[in-house]
Every structure is written in structure tokens, then in C-alpha cells.
Image (cartoon, rainbow, N blue to C red):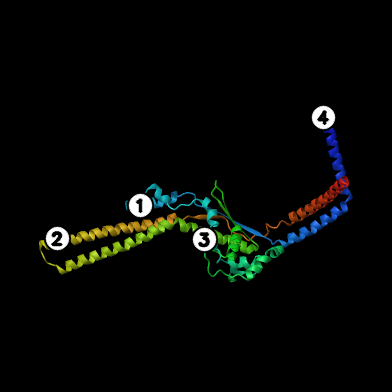
Amino acid sequence: METNIEKVSNQEKEIDLIDLGKKLWVKRKFILKSSIVGLVVGVMVAFSIPKEYVTTVVFAPETSSSTSAGSVGALAVMAGFNLGGGAVNEGQMSPELYPSIAESTPFILGLFNVRVKDLNREVDSTLYYYMKEKQRGVWWSKILNLPGSIIGLFSSEGSNNTPTKINSFALTREQTNIFNNLKSRIIIIVDKKTGVIYLSSTMQSPEISASLADTLTTYLQSYIISYRTQKARQDLSFTEKLYIEAKKDYSEAQQKYAKYLDENQNIILASYRVNQEKLQNEVALTYSVYNQMAQQLQLAKVKVQDTTPVYTIIQPAIVPLVPVRPNKKLIVVGFIILGIILSSGFILGKEIWTEMSNNYN
């Protein structure tokens, strides 16, 4: 009994689908016109969206500190010092933190005054000005942003092309918009297995996209190097001060000893010998400190060099020739399908509404 009911319901569904297909076939001209409208709208939208070019730089940082440990350790042994195993890894930063650094406020704000230009010399300005004035938007965005533009005319914010003063704690509305826009155009991906870093920048100009990617690579490397060597540079500065003081003390002790000898020639007294021995000990002591600080200074210089990470550029920045966005074919096909779906839905909805009205009456 249940099988017969299922067969009847399946037959009704098939009949309904055939009936719906017939209704759509009758209105095929309307559906065709709607698809043509979708084609026209899709072409308009596809050609209204600005082209976007992506440049990707691939590089890899050093993966081991064994070389650094060897050079510093060798000098330490020669100087008579024993460096602990943990001292070599001071200031190291995991590459997995690089994306977070690139998204940080100080890093993005530091890019505002970077100079960018294209081959046609149509753009030769700061990145801030380029993002503000030279980036094209879709035409409907101007309509959507019209209320905000009208409000902006009465606001007290300046309209300078370059940010004369940036307060990272309280950015203006304009600076925040440019900040978010620039932040969304920078992507850093780290391969956890190989440690390879992929840095990409997206811009409407292929030359500026490549230029920004190259600048970002250098800027990120400098940022990481500054962080990695901060402790070593502080130690070097402190050691240099101690070295200068030790050298001064040794020089003064030498001068004092030489002067005492010149003033007390041909004197054979016990007090003279005691003072002479005392001055000799001072010279020896200051020389020992001076010699030790000189060795420490050389170690500190080597440590700064060894803690400076080395990066290997696997794929440099190259001007892209083909835009990655927009996908015009996909947009046009999408609007054609949307036109067919909307027109079919309108036809079927109208038929259902008519049937419901007739049954009600």
C-alpha cells in the first residue's frame, strides 16, 4: 500500500516538473530577454571594477644558529670566556609571527610615507597620497559614500595629501580608512614545514604592486633585524662605554707611573720602592681590565653580526602582466544565470499566485 502511494506521489512530482518546464518554455522569450539584461549588467559591472595586480615575493630566513654559535664560541674560547648554550638564541623570533608584525599598527603606519611611482610617471608620490587619490573605485561606491562625503565637508579634519601628523593612538577617519585598505592589500604566509615566507601586495598599478612588494620585503627584514639585534646592540653600546673608561684609566695610570719615575730618579728609599710597586700594580691592574674589555668589545661586535639574520630571496618582485581581479567571464556568466533564475522565479511565482487567487475565489 505504501509503495503505491510513493509511486503516485512520484508521478505527481514528475507531472509538476513537466508542467513547470512547459510554463517556462512558453515564457522563454521573457527568460531570454532577462538573460540578455543580465549579460549587459554583467558586462557593465565587470568593466566597472578596477583591475588588481598581485606581486609575490618568496624568501627564507636562516633556519639555524649553528654558524653563529661557532664563530662567537670560537672567539669566546680564545678570549677565555665560556658562553652558555642559551645565549646564542637570544632575541630570536619565530617566522610565524611575521604576519602579525605586518598587520601591526606601527608597521602599517610606517608605510604611509614610502615613495611609489609607476613607469609612465603618472604617479610619483607617497603611498598615503596614492591610496587616497589615485586608487580607483567602482562607480556605485561613490553613490553609497555620498552621505559620508557630504558630512565630511563639514568636518574639521584636514584634507592634506600627506599625513603631516599621525597619532597612532587616535587615527582620523581618513587615516583609518587608508590604514584598513592598505592592511587588506598585504598578505604574508609562512610555510611552517619549510620556513619559506610568501609576501604579496595587491595594487591597481602593476609597477606600484611590484615596488611595494619589494619595499615590504626590505622593510620587514629591517624590522626583524632591528628586533633580533636589539639586545646585542645594547650590549655593544654598554661594552664600548666600559672599554673607553678602561682605556682612559690605563692611560692615566701609565702617565702617573711615568711621572713618578721621572721625578724620583737616583733615589734609593724604601718609601720610593713601595710607591713604585704600588703604581706598577695599578698599571698592571688597569691594563688587565683594559685588555679584558677590548676582548669583550670584539665579542660584542661579532655577536651583533651573528645575531643579524640573513634572508635568501627565492623569488624577487617582478612586475605582473596579468591582473588577478576582476574575473570578467565569471562575473558575466554569474549575472546571466542570475537573470535566468530571477525571471524563472518571477514566472513561477506569478503562476502560483494566480492559482492561489483562483482557488480562494
Q: Residue 76: which numbered mark, if any? A: 1
The three-letter code of the residue at mark 1 reads Ala
The answer to whether residue 91 is visible is yes
Compute the Cα span from label 4 to label 1.
90 Å
Q: Residues within 10 Å of mark 2 (few under 14, many from 20)?
A: few
Evaluate if marks 1 and 3 touch, with contact meaning CB atoms under 8 Å apart: no
The three-letter code of the residue at mark 4 reads Thr
Horizontal and vertical percent position of residue 194: 54, 47
Looking at the image, is mark 4 or mark 1 nearer the viewer? 4
The three-letter code of the residue at mark 3 reads Pro
Horizontal and vertical percent position of residue 107: 53, 60
Residue 209 vs 122, above or below: the answer is: above
Compute the Cα span from label 4 to label 2.
124 Å
Q: Which residue is mark 4?
A: 3
The three-letter code of the residue at mark 2 reads Val
The residue positioned 35% from the left and 52% from the top of the image is: 76
Evaluate if marks 4 and 1 touch, with contact meaning CB atoms under 8 Å apart: no
Q: Which residue is mark 2?
A: 274
- Relative placement, left or right, of 205 versus 35 is left
Looking at the image, is mark 1 or mark 3 nearer the viewer? 3
Q: Which residue is mark 3?
A: 106
Secondary structure under badge 4? helix
Looking at the image, is mark 3 or mark 4 nearer the viewer? 4
Q: Earlier in the sequence, mark 3 or mark 4?
A: 4
Q: Earlier in the sequence, mark 4 or mark 1?
A: 4
Secondary structure under badge 1? helix
Secondary structure under badge 2? helix
Horizontal and vertical percent position of residue 179: 58, 62
* Of the pair 305 and 20, the residue shown nearer to us: 20
* Of the pair 164 and 303, the residue shown nearer to us: 164
Compute the Cα span from label 2 to label 3.
63 Å
